[in-house]
Image (cartoon, coloured by chain):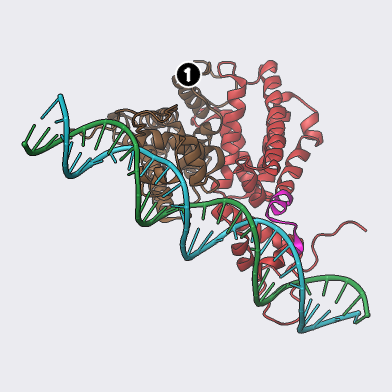
Chain colours: A red, B brown, C cyan, D green
Amino acid sequence: MSSSQEQKSAVGGGNGRNGRAAYDLDAVLDISVAAFNEHGYDATSMGQLAARLGTSKSAVYYHVNGKEDLLRLALERALGPLEAVLDLPGALEGSAEDRLRFVLKQAVHVLVDYLPYVTLLLRLRGNTEVERGALERRRSFDTQVAVLVDQARAEGSLRQDVDSRTIERLLFGMINSIVEWYRPGGSLTRDQLASDVIAVAFDGLHARGEP
Amino acid sequence: MSSSQEQKSAVGGGNGRNGRAAYDLDAVLDISVAAFNEHGYDATSMGQLAARLGTSKSAVYYHVNGKEDLLRLALERALGPLEAVLDLPGALEGSAEDRLRFVLKQAVHVLVDYLPYVTLLLRLRGNTEVERGALERRRSFDTQVAVLVDQARAEGSLRQDVDSRTIERLLFGMINSIVEWYRPGGSLTRDQLASDVIAVAFDGLHARGEP
DNA sequence: ATAGTTTTACTGAACGATCGGTAAGTAGCG
DNA sequence: CGCTACTTACCGATCGTTCAGTAAAACTAT
């Protein structure tokens, strides 16, 4: 009954001319987003996408309505999980500092778990209505975190000498940059990365600071 | 005798049909880079560039060899000043921590002073040889800073519980993100921003910590 | 000072290539 | 037969780029 999304997916599919190949939407999306992230959305043509999928250009149009539709579907996969973080119990209960720590840690988790999709989101320029809509949702997320920073400052747990909007920007600058270098499967695990980020953000780089 | 580059520059140029309009290379570059940053390099056509310059498409080709040449010239304006930081006395003398602090602060200064050009650099995808060359130089810069982080750690001034390469990435994630939100002319000055970044990076967000 | 020449800074039209997208037809399945 | 998952062929638009021509400024010669 539940809407399933994993069925066949002949992703790397070396399907030749045998039977039915049957790409599903997930496979098309995964490969398309990978291409978008490698060359940029605008620099990636539908022809290149088709080549990577091992099919013709118009076969892609069987699965999606067009290039922009592909982008819209991909961005939803990043924005959905990200926005969901703010509704989790950990983001709603406890001290402002605890809630901030929770949201930041979860943001890192979403970033890593949906790495290609979030990467795509973070590189938007706002050229089309779809892009501007996604940027708007992202801005809304940032604003909600900025409120958390403000509350933590009012609580007295955060330094007062740096503007709170600046703090929020620098925090997400640090976190968002993860998509540019982190690749799962290495020695640095997702959870280790998240706690490293929180540690550096809250305690700084200095060696001192008794645990 | 010296090769001068500042001469006329009818940038916003409301040149009608009088005399010679005379754009110089600087004006063309400034306007082009602004357009690249607004819509992305690939999504910006030579036609749009010409429209913003108030001339025809082919007039642009009088000043530069082509779109990629425009990119190459613009990237040099970011990479030159950035690489120069590492040759300054402050980057070569003193303790590793002092040298690291100096380089980070100077990096923020370059970022702000050449904001549009550095912004363009930080958004490259490596589609062409020009882009790959620039990315290579940027990677080399990052590597040299990573060495500084390593030395500061060996000195005992930096925390040992986070991998030094991770530290360098997070540091530059924070610094580079500045191009996405900082605009000169506001209440936050260039120098204030630089010391905010250093303060947050080294001491963290926590309120505690006697100065 | 004037005429002739060269250089500068463009214009408008056109080029082949590639873009996103579509129309019509079809092979393999139940 | 009818449906799914394509294929080949093609469309108009736009891309970066080129080219022949030209008006105005700058330089040179008389």
Residue at 59% over, 16% down: A160
Q: Is residue A35 visible?
A: yes
- The answer to whether C15 is drawn above or below residue B156 in the figure is below
Please say whether residue A65 is one of the residues in the magenta stretch.
yes
**Residue A102 picture quarter:** top right
Q: Nearer the viewer, residue A211 or A169?
A: A169
The residue at which mark 1 appears reads as: B189
Q: Report x, y in % for residue B134.
A: 40, 48
Residue at 78% over, 26% down: A94
Could you tell me which chain the residue with mark 1 belongs to?
Answer: B
Q: Is residue A189 left or right of residue C25?
A: left
Q: Nearer the viewer, residue B184 or B171?
A: B184
User: Does dot 1 land on a helix, a strand or a loop?
Assistant: loop
Magenta stretch: dominant secondary structure: helix
- The answer to whether B190 is drawn above or below residue B180 in the figure is above
Q: Is residue B177 left or right of residue A133?
A: left
- The answer to whether B181 is drawn above or below residue A181 in the figure is above
Q: Nearer the viewer, residue D21 or A173?
A: D21
Q: Report x, y in % for residue B83.
A: 34, 39
Boundaries of the magenta span = A62-74
Q: Report x, y in % for residue B142.
A: 42, 43
**Residue B55 picture quarter:** top left
Residue at 37% over, 40% down: B79
Q: Is residue B9 left or right of residue A121?
A: left
